Amino acid sequence: EKAGFDHFMLKEIHEQPKAYRDTMMGRIGADGKSVTLSKEIGMTTEQIRGISRVHIVACGTAFHAGLVGKTVIESLARIPVETDVASEYRYRSPIITPDTLVIVVSQSGETADTLAALREAKRNGARVLAITNVVGSSVARDADDVITTWAGPEIAVASTKAYSSQLIAFYLLGLYLAQERGTIEQAQVAEIVEAMHRLPDQVESILEQAELYKGVAEAVSKHDNLFFIGRGLDFAVAQEGSLKLKEISYIHSEAYAAGELKHGTLALIEDGIPVIALVTQEDLYEKTLSNIKEVKARGAHVLGIANAGYEDEVAKSVDETFSIPRTLPLLTPALSVVPLQLLSYHASLARGNDVDKPRNLAKSVTVE
Ligand code: F6R
C-alpha cells in the first residue's frame, strides 16, 4: 500500500504532481485562458462583486496554505483578506458581515476548531466556502460552497500533498474571483494558467533529486535549534517548513520574516546554527540577501533555497544552495515547499523517529 516507498509521507510527497493535475482538472477552460469554478461556487457574479472582505480560517498546515491564499486573493482579486488560526478567530469577535466571504481550509474536513469557526461565521450571516480534501466531510456539508482538493487520501500525519493541493485550489480561486470581479486581464490569466500547467513536471524534477536533501537533513538532525527565514511568500512557506520539521523530527525551529530578525532574534544566532533561507521572490532578492549576510556574520550555517537562474548569486552569500525550477513568483510556494518536506522527512528518519506517526499528534483533531 506504500507503493514501494518506505513511508506514507514519502509516497505522498511523490504524489504531488498527480495531486496538482487532479486539482486543476476540469477547472481550467479548454482555451487555457480562463478558470471555471461555477460548479463549486454557487455565487452569482453580482454576489462575487459584492464581497467586501475575505477571512481565511484554518489550523496548522492548512492555516499556512491560507497565508499564501491571502497574498493570492489580494493580488489577483484585490479584496482585503485576513488569515486566522481557527481557535483564535472564534473568540476574538471578528467583524463578520453578510458581505464577508469566509474561507475555511481543512484537509480532513473534521477539525473541531475549524468547524466551530465555520459555524460562528454562518451564525453571523457570512457565506462560507470550504477548501477540503474529503468529500462529504463535516466542513464540506456545512459550507455553502466547496472546492475539493483532489489530493487523494493522506495517511501520514504530517500533511504534504494536501497542503500543496490547497495552494493549487487558492490559485484557481484567486483567478476565478479576479475574473468575476474584472480585476485581471485575460492575458494574465493565460500566463498564470500556463505556468500552473508546468508545476507538476517542475515538482517531478525536484523529486528526481530527492536524495540531495538526505545529507543536509542528517547534518541538521544533529542540532536542537534552527531557523527558517524568508520574505513575502517565502515567509509563508518558511512557516510551513518549520512546522513540518518540528512535528516529525522534534527539532525546535522557528520561522522568521527575514527582515524581522534584527528586531531581537539575531541574539539567538550563534556559531554553527543552521538557517534555512528561502530566496525565491524576485522583488525581495536583495533584501533577503542582506538579511542572510546578517546571520552569516554571526556564524550561522546558511542553506539557501533559490530559483534556478539566481542560484549562483545566492551561492555567494550562503554555505549550501539548492535550486528549484523557475515559475511565477506567486506560484513558487507550490515548488519551494517540496525541498522542505524532504528535509523534514530525512531529518525525522535520521533521528530514528516514526515518520508517519509522530508523537502527540493525530491526523484529525476533533477536540477544541
Ligand atoms: C500538520 C498537520 C496539522 C493539520 C491541522 C489541520 O502536518 O497535519 O497541522 O494541518 O491539524 O488539519 P485539517 O487540515 O484536517 O483541518
Image (cartoon, rainbow, N blue to C red):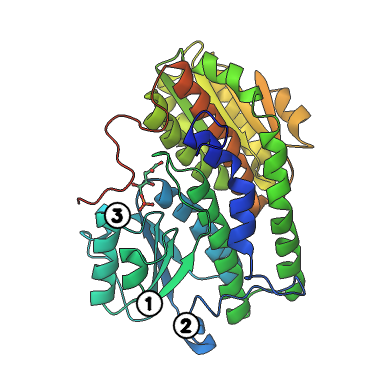
Q: Name the residue under label 3.
A: 111
Q: Name the residue under label 2.
A: 42
Seen from the viewer's position, the closer of residues 140 and 238 is 140
Q: In this view, does 344 lie to the left or right of 32?
A: left
Q: Is residue 273 left or right of residue 109?
A: right
Give the residue type at disc 2: Gly
Give the residue type at disc 1: Asp
- The mark nearer the N terminus, 3 or 2, is 2
Q: Can residue 264 be seen in this view?
A: no
Q: Is 364 above or below relative to 251? A: below
Q: Is mark 1 on a helix, strand or loop?
A: loop
Q: Are the residues tagged 1 and 3 within 8 Å (C-beta)? A: no
Query: In x, y percent, where is residue 43?
Result: 47, 83
Characterize the local packing of mark 2: few (<14), some (14-19) or many (20 or more) Cα atoms within 10 angstroms: some
Query: In x, y percent, where is residue 279?
Result: 64, 37
Q: Name the residue under label 1.
A: 144
Q: Are the residues tagged 1 and 2 within 8 Å (C-beta)? A: yes
**Cα separation between marks 3 and 2:** 24 Å
Q: Is 317 above or below relative to 34? A: above
Q: Is mark 3 on a helix, strand or loop?
A: loop
Q: Can you tell which quarter of the image residue 66 is in?
A: bottom left
Residue pictured at 30% horizontal, 65% vertical: 138
